Image: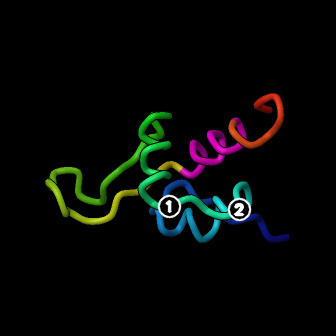
Amino acid sequence: MQTPLTVRLATLDVLRETTIPLFLSPVPSRATLRDWFDRARIPRFKANPLARRGGGPVYYSVAAVEKFLRSRTLPGGL
């Protein structure tokens, strides 16, 4: 029996390709998504937390993104 693969962190580009199209079509721009995620206080992480600007990719919590999108796209926020 195979267990489903669970992803905890993903970059914005990966989220735009995999998770977000399941909830929204068309997929919003990177700038719009970043603004939404910042306003919703979705946790994000850097591969190198000591790096300043341009210090590598930023990863978002996939579970938090899914919860946010469900609350915004389903009737009654279910």
Q: Which residue is mark 1?
A: 29
Q: Quadrant of residue 22?
A: bottom right
Residue 7 horizontal/vertical position (percent)? 59, 60
Q: Quadrant of residue 20?
A: bottom right
Q: Which mark is residue 51?
A: none
Q: Secondary structure at mark 2?
A: loop
Q: Residue at x 70, y 56 (%)?
A: 24
Q: Magenta residues: mostly which secondary structure?
A: helix
Extreme residue toward the top, this view = 76
Residue 11 horizontal/vertical position (percent)? 45, 63
- Quadrant of the snapshot with the C terminus: top right
How far apart, in angstroms, are the residues tagged by discs 1 and 2?
11 Å
Pick the residue in front: 12 or 5. Answer: 12
Question: In the drawing, does residue 41 fall left or right of residue 70?
Answer: left
Q: Secondary structure at mark 1?
A: loop
Alpha-carbon neighbours of circle 1 within 10 Å: few (<14), some, or many (≥20)? few
Q: Quadrant of residue 71?
A: top right
Q: Amino acid at mark 2?
A: Ser
Q: Which mark is residue 25?
A: 2
Magenta stretch containing residue 64, yes or no?
yes
Question: In the drawing, does residue 10 fall left or right of residue 66?
Answer: left
Residue 18 horizontal/vertical position (percent)? 63, 68
Q: Amino acid at mark 1?
A: Ser
Q: Which residues are magenta?
A: 62-71
Alpha-carbon neighbours of circle 2 within 10 Å: few (<14), some, or many (≥20)? few
Magenta stretch containing residue 24, yes or no?
no
- Quadrant of the snapshot with the N terminus: bottom right
Q: Residue at x 83, y 35 (%)?
A: 75
